[in-house]
Image: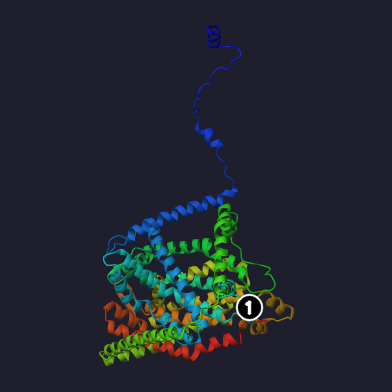
Amino acid sequence: MSATSSGASLKSPNSKRPERAPRLRLRTPLRIWSMLPRPSAASLPDVVMFAAGLALFYGIVEIARHWLGPYHPQVEISRSPAALPVYAGYSLLRIALAYVLSLIFALVYGYIAAYRPRAERFMIPLLDVLQSIPVLSFLPGVMLAMAALFPGRQLGVELGAVLLIFTGQVWNIAFSFYASLKSIPREMREAATIYRFNAWQRFFQIELPFATIGLVWNSMMSVAGAWFFLMACEQFGDFRLPGLGSYLQAAADSGDSRSILLGIVTMISVIVLMDQLIWRPVIAWAEKFKFEQVESASAPTSWVLEFLRHSRGIAYLRKRAVRPVREQMIHYFARADGNEPRAQSPGENEMSVWIWRGVGIVILAAIGYAVVRVVMIITGLHSSEFRNLGLGLGATFLRVNATLVLGALWTIPVGVAIGFNPRLARIAQPLAQIAASVPATALFPVVLLILIRLGGGLGFGSIVLLLLGTQWYILFNVIAGAMAIPSDLKEAAAVFGLRGWERWQKLILPGIFPFLVTGMITASGGAWNASIVAEYFNFKGQTYSTVGVGAMISAATAAKNFNLLLASTIALAAVVVTTNRLVWRRLYRLAETRYKLES
C-alpha cells in the first residue's frame, strides 16, 4: 500500500504539465481597425442612407419638442443669415406634411368623383370652387378651430399653418387624378375585368400606375405653389411662425432688400436640392408607368436613383420586408373580394335607408342654417360695398382670363418641347420649379420699381404677378401630357411624315388635351387664389392696391371685416361655379369622349 501510494505521488517524466490560465491580450487600436471590414464603394449608399436617417430623426425630435411646447404668440423673426437653414427646415416640414395630406385627400376625392356619377355632379364644381377661394378666406376658420382643439399649445398654430398650405396644394393633384381615371383606355379596363381584379387590385395595378406621371408633375407644381403662398401662411394677424415665409415677409415689411435676396437664394437652394434628391429620381422611376408598346429611346435618368439601386441595405429591406408585405396585402384583398357578400335582410336594408335619410336631414338643416346666417350678414352690408364688390369681380375676372391666354401662348409650345426632349427636361425642370416657387410678393419691389419707371399702374402689374403664380400650372401639366404620349404614336407620326401644324393637330394637341384642360382649370383657380397677393401688397409701411376682389379680401382680412370677407368669398365662388358649368365641365366631357387614348 505504501509503495503504491508513494509511487502515485511521484510525477512521471511523460506526464503533461497543468495548463496555465489564458492571459487577456490587449490589442492596439491599429490592430482592431485592421480587423474591421474594409469600406467599399458598394457600402457607400448604405452609409449615406443611415446618416440621412439619423439627421432626419434628430430634426423630427427637435421640431416635435418645439411644437409640443407652450404657445408663443409673437415670435421674433431674426434676419440673420445664420437663422435661414433653421427657418428653411421649419418651412420644409410644414410643406411636406401638407403634401402628404394633399395626396391622401386627392386619391380619395378623385376616386369617388370618377366612379360615382351622382357624387361627381357636385364634387367637381365644389373642387373648382374650393381651389379658387383664396388662402386668406380659410384663415379665420382654420386658425380658430386649431386654437380651440389645442389650447395654449404651439401645435395648434402649426397645424393651422399646415392646413392653410394644404388649401394651396391639394386641388390640382385631385383634378389630375380625377382626369387620369376618366381617361383610362377601355382595353385596360377590359383586361382588369377578364382577370377578375377586385377594387384594390384594379387601383394598385391599373389606376394608380396610369395616373402616376400626372400625379408626379402636379405634385411638383403643388409644392411650388406651397412656396408661393408661404408668406401668407406663416404670418397672419396675431400669429407668426418661424420659417422662410415669415422671414421674407418681415424683410419686405422693413424694406430690407438684402434679407429678401438672401431668403430667395435660400429658397432656390432648397428647391434645387429637392429637384436633385426627390423629383428627378421620382420622374425617372415613374417612366416605367408610361402607357406605350414601344420602349422610348431616351428616358429620364437620375444619379440619385442609380445610387439607391446599388444600396445593399435597401435591396435587403425590399426583399425581406416590402415584397412580403405587398404580397400578403394582395392575397388578403383577393381573398376578401372572393368571399360572397352576405345578403342583407329587409330589416337591415330599411334601417340603413333611415340612417342615411337622417344624415341627409341633418346636413340639409346645417346648410339651411348657414344660408340664413349668410343672408343676415350680407344684408348688413352697405350699397357702396356691393357696388365695389361688383366692380372688383369684373376687374379680377378680366385679369384672370388675360392671364390664362398669355400663359397658354408660351407654356404649350415650351411644355411640349420639354416633354419630348429628356435632355432639355433635365435643364428646364429645375428652372421651372424655381420660377414657380418664388413668391410674387418677394419679387413685387422689383416689379413695382419697373412699373413706376415705365409709368404703368398696378392694374397691369397685377397681371404680371398673376402670371408669376399661375402659368406654371399649365406648363407642368403640358409637360406631363407630352411625356405621356406613347413612343409608338410618335414613331407612327414620323413614318407618315407628319410635320408642322399637321403634327400638332393630329398628334400633339389630342395627346395633351386632357392634361391641358386640367392645367387650365387649375391655373384659373390659382389665378383667383393668387389675386390676394397680386392686387394688394404692403411694402415699407405703405399699401399698394388696385380694383379687384382679391384686394377686397386682403383688405377685409387686414381690417378684420369678416362680413365683407364672407360676401367677397361667396361672390367669387358664384363666378367660379358659373364658369365651371359653362366651360370646364364641357371641356372635361370632350376630353373623356373624343381625346381618350385607346387602341
- Quadrant (top left, top right, bottom left, bottom right) of the C terminus: bottom right
Q: Is residue 409 visible?
A: no
Query: Percent x, y for residue 159?
Result: 35, 68
Front-most of 77 and 450?
77
Residue visible at 52% across and 68% down? Answer: 431
353, above or below 260, in the image: below
Q: Which amino acid does label 1 sit on?
A: Met
Query: Percent x, y for residue 215?
Result: 53, 73
Front-most of 48 and 64?
64
Query: Percent x, y for residue 238?
Result: 27, 70
For numbered disc 1, what is the local secondary structure?
helix
Residue 330 lies in what quarter of the image? bottom right
Residue visible at 44% across and 65% down? Answer: 96
Label 1 sits on residue: 188
Front-most of 496 and 211?
211
Q: Is residue 225 visible?
A: yes
Query: Percent x, y for residue 251?
Result: 34, 66
